[in-house]
Amino acid sequence: MTAAARPRDSRLIGYVALGMAAGVLYSLLDAVSESKIGSGTLTGFLAAAHDVVDRTSPILVGALLGVCVHYLQLRSQLAAAQEAAARSEALRTRLHKVERDQAVWVLAAAVLHGLNNPLHALGLLLDELPATDGDDARREDLIARARAQADRALAHLRALRSMRGLGEPELQRIALDRVIASVANDAGSLAAEDGLTIRTECSQAVPANADPAYVRTIVENLVDNSLHALRGGGGGCVTVRVASEGGRAVVRVCDDGPPLDEAARASLFEPLRSTKTQGLGLGLPIARALARAMRGDLSFEQSSAKAFRLELPLHEGP
């Protein structure tokens, strides 16, 4: 029994005791009245009133009993509904934690796999370096590009370190528009190497309750997927829009590349299913798990331009 239920039960016992005391008092008065009527000392209006009360009391008591039974049924149903809601919330919390914990372990494999691309590119750039003797401009360009790939590899490792073991995400008030602008700025230099562009659209500040490291991991994954699709041909711009919609903070990552076919859309968030030739198919399932761990969600929107929609709790207050 919960602490809240005990005071209610105490009050119920008190009401029952009070009702019993009233019944005993009525019985005593009724007995006295009957005795006086029998002896002829109670006549006229008082005798008639006693007769009316005596005849209507069973009807009133029956009505009150019906009300009490109805109240007890409602109380029982309310308690059952509250208990079911508490169990549902506890189950939802456990499922979110299990999903988030699984994502933490899988993220290690995803990060290691993600290191392949920048490390491979870094190796190719270093192979070209000996051929730049006497060409300082080309040498400086190769060094700058190698440094960018090294930064990209370090970013993957920072994402892994930002996952704090098996604990809950550190939800806090963040300026979502600033976090997204930082991600777009970091990825912009890598996109420029392939002749692609990343732009952000945000008409106003959007505060959200979220973990900034989780948000970066999710959006970096979505932007990287868009860049990969654009490198395959068709289109050349990734747009990241930040807005507040219906009391939620929303980030949309879309590109002007070719639309996804129906089969690819159906398996977007299934683990180990990837449209990339060397992909593990873990990025989107992990991103969705991280979003849900922050009481948000990640979904796909098929419109004029394909877009992924990240939804987060909107921060309310100062």
Image (cartoon, rainbow, N blue to C red):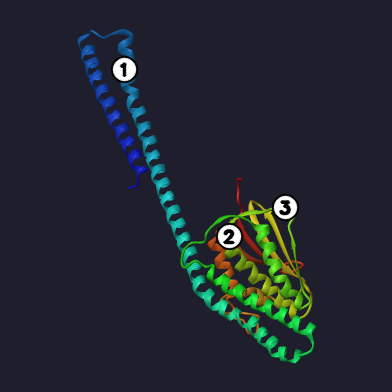
Quarter location, residue 172:
bottom right
Q: Is residue 16 left or right of residue 285?
A: left
Relative to 87, does residue 73 appear above or below in the rendering? above
Question: Is residue 183 something that shows in the picture?
Answer: yes
**Quarter of the image with the C terminus in it:** top right
Q: CA distance from mark 3 to mark 2?
A: 21 Å
Amino acid type of the residue that numbered disc 2 sits on in the rendered structure: Gly
Element carrying mark 2: loop
Tag 1: residue type? Asp
Query: Is label 3 or label 2 in front?
Result: 3
* Closer to us: 180 or 233: 180
1 or 2: mark nearer the eye: 2
- Marks 1 and 3, how far apart at CA: 78 Å
* Distance between mark 1 and mark 2 Cα atoms: 69 Å
User: Dot 1 lies on which element?
Assistant: helix
Q: Position of residue 44 (x, y in %)?
A: 31, 8
Q: Quadrant of residue 42?
A: top left
Q: Which residue is mark 2?
A: 296
Tag 3 residue = 204
Q: How many marks?
A: 3
| Amino acid at circle 3 | Gln
Of mark 1 and mark 2, the one earlier in the sequence is 1
Numbered disc 3: secondary structure? loop
Quick one: label 3, few (<14), some, or many (20+) residues within 10 Å? few
Q: Tell me if residue 200 comes above or below residue 137 in the rendering.
A: above
Residue drawn at point x = 31 percent, y = 17 percent: 51
Q: Residue at x 67, y 84 (%)?
A: 121
Q: Which badge, 3 or 2, comes first in the chain's sequence?
A: 3
Front residue of this view, candidates 24 and 110: 110
Residue 51's tag is 1
